[in-house]
Amino acid sequence: MSKSVFTEKYVKFRRLLVEVRQAHQLTQVQVAERLQKPQSFVSKYERGERRLDVVEFLEVARALGVDPSDFLEQLEYSGAEMAADRDR
């Protein structure tokens, strides 16, 4: 198992975080304020400069107003969809 933030699955995870933030019409600054962190924290995990651990992910999901389970299910579904496309 690779620890890279550049694995296909982790790239999709980061993209999904950005998509959810934008769908909720939130800026990085607004998410950072909800997390009580600097805007650079949000920027760095969105660009892959740092990984989120599980506790941080739960906090981010809460700040984005999304259920963590639903988010992970969406990630898993999109991953299965990507694999099916690759196999075609």
Image (tube, helix red, strand yellow):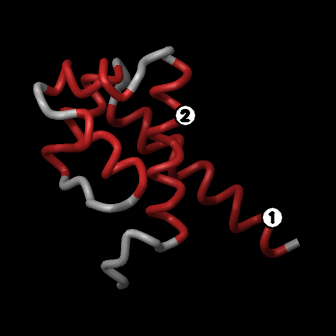
- Element type at mark 2: helix
Question: Residue at image x 54%, y 69%?
Answer: 8
Snapshot quadrant of residue 56? top left
Q: Which residue is mark 2?
A: 19
Q: Amino acid at mark 2?
A: Glu
Q: Quadrant of the C terminus?
A: bottom right
Q: Which residue is mark 1?
A: 85
Q: Residue furthest right?
A: 88
Question: Residue 80 or 8: which is nearer the viewer?
Answer: 8
Question: Residue at image x 53%, y 55%?
Answer: 12
Marks counted in the figure total: 2
Q: Position of residue 35 (x, y in %)?
A: 16, 27
Q: Quadrant of the N terminus?
A: bottom left
Question: Residue 83 or 11: which is nearer the viewer?
Answer: 11
Q: Residue furthest top?
A: 25
Q: Position of residue 67 (x, y in %)?
A: 35, 26
